[in-house]
Structure formats: structure tokens, C-alpha cells
């Protein structure tokens, strides 16, 4: 990562570190094994997210829909859409065990390219923005574009995504200019095969807003005692509807999400601080080291102490 990388907080969950201080683009390699249970945190952000599956397969969950990516496939997630991804057999395994507590043996084989592109990279005058950019960003039918080679133009878009990805990650000369030019080319193809062909349906209210509100509540209050009723009240709904929304979108209950989020924060502290296990447990909302260790081992298969030891 460039030491001068610009850091932008787009939501409560993650910090976007751009590869250049001049251009809002982030490119990085990723493996499902990088995440607890091989499942990425549920999140949303102001960037367009582009994924190309380099090896293996995975499931992408976007606004309650499931998309299967196989090797060579790609996917484009529109801005501010709620999403996460996990192993391609996560859902089938979750019927046998609690969701997100099963880590497939081949999770290390899932390797993909991640490209985050902020629409500001394309904005240079208001008329162009209103004609070519906003209709796609706010289209209710364009939450996701699955690039599964079912159309000829999919290959060209994937090629452009990879051109941007490698230009940025390898920092070729003038990579910001190369990335921006390829982004314009890929946007042109995308626009011609979506909005220009099908029109657009402007959605003024995000149907995921109640769920986002509840997720944000958990992220803001995970260090304190949080009950199912607290989460449901944050979303202004009953507990049963709250649970249904979490299950449909995140494949886990609100309390499972809370515990997973606490463990994610714990992993960060294990990686980046010298705090003791007890201090981390209390910092992450657990009553003590024993419960933290038990929950950590249930989710990750090893204890916090073993995890920290493996990092050195």
C-alpha cells in the first residue's frame, strides 16, 4: 500500500485506503481465508465494487439476492448496496450448522481481484453526470451486474477491470491516467448494455435502509450490552421482522452478526495492538476472557492466543 494512500471512512465498517492520493481507486488481491470463517463483513460504500474471480468460486450476497461467481467470472456491485461474500457452499453448510461457523477446507483456493472505483473519477461536468452516470447509480434494476460470459460484452468489461487492477497494483507509469481511461471505456460499455438498452427506474428510498440502520446500531454499540430488542427498535420494527431481514440479507441472526462483529474487532486488536486477551475481550463487549476465547474458537477454530501466535 502506498504510504501516501488517501484514507476515506465511507461507513462504520471499513476504511477505504486508496492506492493513490490523486485518484479514488483501490485495487487489492483477496482470499476468503483473509476473513473470519471465510466470510467478508457485510458492508456498503460509495464506490462501485468490481470483482473478478481468479481462482475457485464464491457466493456474493447483494440486497437479499445470491450470485454465484466461478473462475473467470466477474461481478459489479453498484454504489451503496449492502453486500458480503463467502464460500460457494456456505448456505448449504449453514443448514447443518449455525451460519458462518463452518470454514470449508478449500477456502484458501478462493482468490479474487477487488477493485473499488469511486464515481467521482468519471465526473467532469454536470450534464455528462446527469446523462451517463446518475441514471445507473440510482437505477433500481442495476444493483448488480453479473459478468458470467452470457453476453459478448462481459468479456470486454472484465478485461477493462483487470487492466485497471493490474495498472494500479503494479503501479505502472502514469497508472492513475491509465486507470481513469479504462474506467471511462468500461463505463461506456456498461451504460450501453444497461441504461441505454433498458432505461432506468429511479429509486429514491433504499429498501435496505432499515437493515443498514440496525447494522450501524450494532457497530456503534458493540462494546456495550446489546439485545435483540435493542436492534429491532433501532430499525423501528418487531423482533421477528428484524430476524427475518438479517437472515435474508446476511445469512445470520442479529445476535450472530453482533458476535461476529465483536470477533472481527477482536482480530483487529490482536493484529495491531499489544493489549492482553482480557483487555481485548472487555474492549469488544465480552464480559471476560473465557467467553471471548470460547466464541473466538467457535468462529475461527483456534483460540485468540493461538491466532496471535500464528501471526508471528
Image (spheres, grey):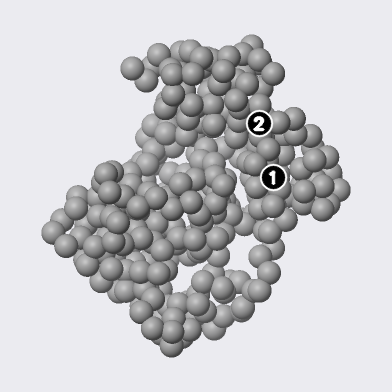
Write the residue at 52% across / 79% down: 135
Q: Looking at the picture, how far across and down is residue 273, in whole percent?
A: 44, 24
In-front residue for pair 22/85: 22
Left or right of residue 55: residue 230: right
Between the residue at mark 1 and the residue at mark 2, the CA separation in whole angstroms equals 11 Å
Left or right of residue 279: residue 118: left
In-front residue for pair 169/285: 285
Write the residue at 48% across / 13% down: 305
Q: Looking at the picture, how far across and down is residue 50, in whole percent?
A: 41, 58
Write the residue at 69% across / 63% down: 207
Residue 255 vs 299, above or below: the answer is: below
Figure quadrant of the N terminus? top left
Badge 2 marks a residue whose secondary structure is loop
Figure quadrant of the C terminus? top left
Give the label on residue 223, or none: 2
What is the count of numbered marks? 2
Any part of residue 68 in sight: no
Q: Quadrant of residue 152?
A: bottom left
Any part of residue 139 in sight: yes
Badge 1 marks a residue whose secondary structure is helix
Q: Looking at the picture, how far across and down is residue 220, in whole percent?
A: 65, 41
Left or right of residue 13: residue 168: left
Write the residue at 36% across / 60% down: 24
Q: Earlier in the sequence, mark 1 or mark 2?
A: 1
Residue 259 vs 51, above or below: the answer is: above
Give the label on residue 217, or none: 1
Q: Looking at the picture, how far across and down is residue 17, in whole percent?
A: 38, 49
Residue 37 vs 117, above or below: the answer is: above
Amino acid at each position: 500500500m502506498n504510504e501516501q494512500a488517501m484514507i476515506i471512512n465511507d461507513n462504520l465498517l471499513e476504511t477505504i485506503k486508496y492506492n493513490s492520493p490523486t485518484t479514488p481507486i483501490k485495487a487489492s488481491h483477496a482470499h476468503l481465508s483473509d476473513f473470519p470463517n471465510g466470510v467478508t463483513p457485510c458492508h456498503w460504500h460509495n464506490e462501485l465494487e468490481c470483482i473478478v474471480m481468479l481462482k475457485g468460486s464464491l457466493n456474493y450476497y447483494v440486497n437479499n439476492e445470491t450470485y454465484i461467481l466461478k473462475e473467470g467470472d466477474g461481478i459489479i456491485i453498484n454504489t451503496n448496496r449492502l453486500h458480503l461474500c463467502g464460500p460457494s457452499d456456505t448456505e448449504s453448510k449453514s443448514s447443518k450448522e449455525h451460519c458462518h461457523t463452518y470454514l470449508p477446507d478449500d477456502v484458501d483456493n478462493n482468490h479474487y481481484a477487488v477493485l473499488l472505483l469511486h464515481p467521482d473519477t468519471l465526473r467532469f461536468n454536470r450534464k455528462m453526470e446527469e446523462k451517463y452516470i446518475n441514471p445507473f447509480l440510482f437505477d433500481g434494476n442495476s444493483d448488480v451486474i453479473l459478468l458470467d460470459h452470457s453476453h459478448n460484452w462481459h468479456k470486454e468489461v472484465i478485461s477493462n477491470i483487470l487492466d485497471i487492477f493490474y495498472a494500479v497494483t503494479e503501479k505502472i507509469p502514469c497508472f492513475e491516467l491509465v486507470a481513469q481511461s479504462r474506467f471511462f471505456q468500461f463505463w461506456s460499455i456498461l451504460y450501453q448494455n444497461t441504461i441505454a438498452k433498458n432505461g432506468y427506474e429511479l429509486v429514491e428510498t433504499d429498501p435496505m435502509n432499515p437493515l443498514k440502520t440496525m447494522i450501524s446500531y450494532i457497530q456503534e454499540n458493540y462494546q456495550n450490552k446489546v439485545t435483540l430488542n435493542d436492534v429491532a427498535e433501532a430499525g423501528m420494527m418487531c423482533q421477528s421482522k428484524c430476524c427475518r431481514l438479517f437472515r435474508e440479507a446476511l445469512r445470520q441472526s442479529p445476535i450472530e452478526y453482533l458476535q461476529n462483529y465483536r470477533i472481527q474487532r477482536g482480530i483487529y486488536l490482536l493484529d495491531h495492538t499489544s493489549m492482553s486477551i482480557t483487555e481485548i475481550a472487555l474492549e469488544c463487549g465480552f464480559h471476560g476472557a473465557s467467553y471471548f476465547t470460547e466464541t473466538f474458537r467457535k468462529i475461527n477454530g483456534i483460540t485468540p492466543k493461538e491466532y496471535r501466535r500464528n501471526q508471528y
